[in-house]
Amino acid sequence: MSTIQQKLSVTEKIGYSLGDLAANLVFQTLLTFLAFFYTDVYGLKPEVATPIIFFVGLFAAIVFNPIIGALADRTETRWGKFRPWILWTSVPLGVISLLAFSTPDFSEQGKIYYAIITYGLLLFFYAASNLPYAALSGVITGDMAERNSISSYRFVAVMVAQFIVQVGMYPFVDYMGGGDRVIGFSKVMTYLAGAGIIMLIITFLTTKERIVPKPEQKSTLKEDFNDLTNNRPWVIMLVLTILVFVTLALKGGMYIYYFENYLSESHIANFVSGLGLGVPDNPASYGFSLFNAGGIIFMIIGIMFSKPLADKHGKRNVFGIALVVSTLFILAFYFFPPEAIGLVVGSQILHGFFYGITIPILWAMIADVADYSEWKTNRRATAIIFSAMMVGLKLGLTFGGAMITGILGHYGYVAGAATQSPEAINGIKSAISIFPSLFFFIGAGLLFFYEIDKDMEVKIEQELKIRRG
């Protein structure tokens, strides 16, 4: 295993982080608006949208990610293994993200086929871009402190994308479409797709792969998968990733229904005007944006605490404690009355801060699992390890997204109705509080079995440095 200078410039860290900003313009849109777009804009019934989100997502998670991971680990170019994938997929990902949020003038059956095809292609190109991008973090440096640092840069960029999508996109859709959300989504996605293409190209141009396996360390697919199944930290991280992204998809996609159908519009309007922002024309839209803005700003502040805390106490301990505390503020949403807008926003801010601490650590832990595997087996298969985590991410997104429309259908939600039934309201409240809290608490409990603590992090880093010369 050959390496060169492991310290990274600020330019390279920013360049790398732009790749996640681009990817999250897509991912955060899926997380926040896919279910809402399908049911309230595109015009699919919840019972139709649910199997599309579930089965297409399940196929993509199980099939696309392992194939891309195996291919990326075996890619040999003068630019490295993973950077070329970021370049090759930049334009196709941008184009298909626009098409997936367009509403063609098709019959009902035609719209179903169009949704299946465009959602499937979007998940394919997302995997082909984002999986090699994630694996790049495992070979861009072998220095644990630098890896924590680049994760912090990366996830500040994620928060910027989240801010753009969750705070600005909903009002901007209404503005760009003149009240017509079909036109609004199409126009907004055009801008986001163009920006994403440019940022992915910048990531390709500004980064470098420094950890390069020696030819004699090449492994077969069978050896790679055997290494995975015998790697307990990897198994734990896979399950943890699924649980985290089920929660993110479920609560993230359901928030808009919480604002549109549960919280009091008059109290939202009073809250917004009380901040000196005037009286909004669409209180739910502006309240939703402010709610997300508060959470994202404090997530960014939490991310700033992530690296020093992880460096001092180890990733595992910091991640577990911060995850548990953040979950308590999710659980509180179930108990807030529809008039308590200040409490809703305050709880989101506190949740955002503590969850922000965990965000960079999750992916840095996965990079540590790749090091752990190399330390145990003397072989490095970075992309296949990250592909397994991407399977977890896609499974989480799939289960969480399908749960949104499934819960809505089960509790009798009616798209566009002036008022929803008490059962539907209870389903919406449970889906942003009780259900996601269960997944987060289980994930935190799994960390008791995760053996890479602070002492082992140091030991692995030092021994691998010696082996790599």
Image (spheres, rainbow, N blue to C red):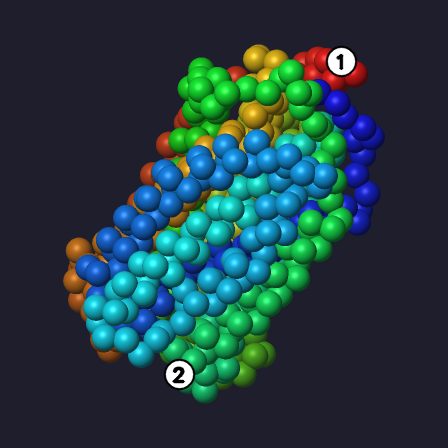
Q: Position of residue 351 (x, y in %)?
A: 50, 49
Decide: is 307 above or below 25.
above
Q: Residues within 10 Å of mark 2 (few under 14, many from 20)?
A: few
- Return the x and y of residue 106 as percentages of the image width and height: 28, 75
Q: Nearer the viewer, residue 370 or 83?
A: 83
Residue 263 left/right relative to 231: left
Q: Amino acid at mark 2?
A: Asp
Residue indicated by mark 1: 466
* Among the 4 quarters of the image, the one containing residue 253: bottom left
Residue 411 to residue 435: above or below: below
Position of 73 with respect to 460 (left or right) is left
Can residue 356 be seen here? The reply is: no
Label 1, label 2: how far apart the Cα atoms are: 61 Å
Q: Earlier in the sequence, mark 1 or mark 2?
A: 2
Please tell me whether residue 140 is drawn above or below residue 429 in the rendered image: above
Q: Residue at x 41, y 27 (%)?
A: 445
> For the point 40% across and 83% down, which residue is it?
180
Relative to 90, does residue 176 appear above or below in the rendering? below
Q: Quadrant of residue 197?
A: bottom right
Quick one: which residue is furthest to the bottom in this view? Answer: 178
Q: Nearer the viewer, residue 31 or 300?
A: 31
The type of residue carrying mark 1 is Ile
Q: Position of residue 51 (x, y in %)?
A: 24, 53
Q: What residue is disc 2 on?
A: 180
Of badges 1 and 2, the one in the foreground is 1
What residue is drawn where x is 36% and y is 38%?
62
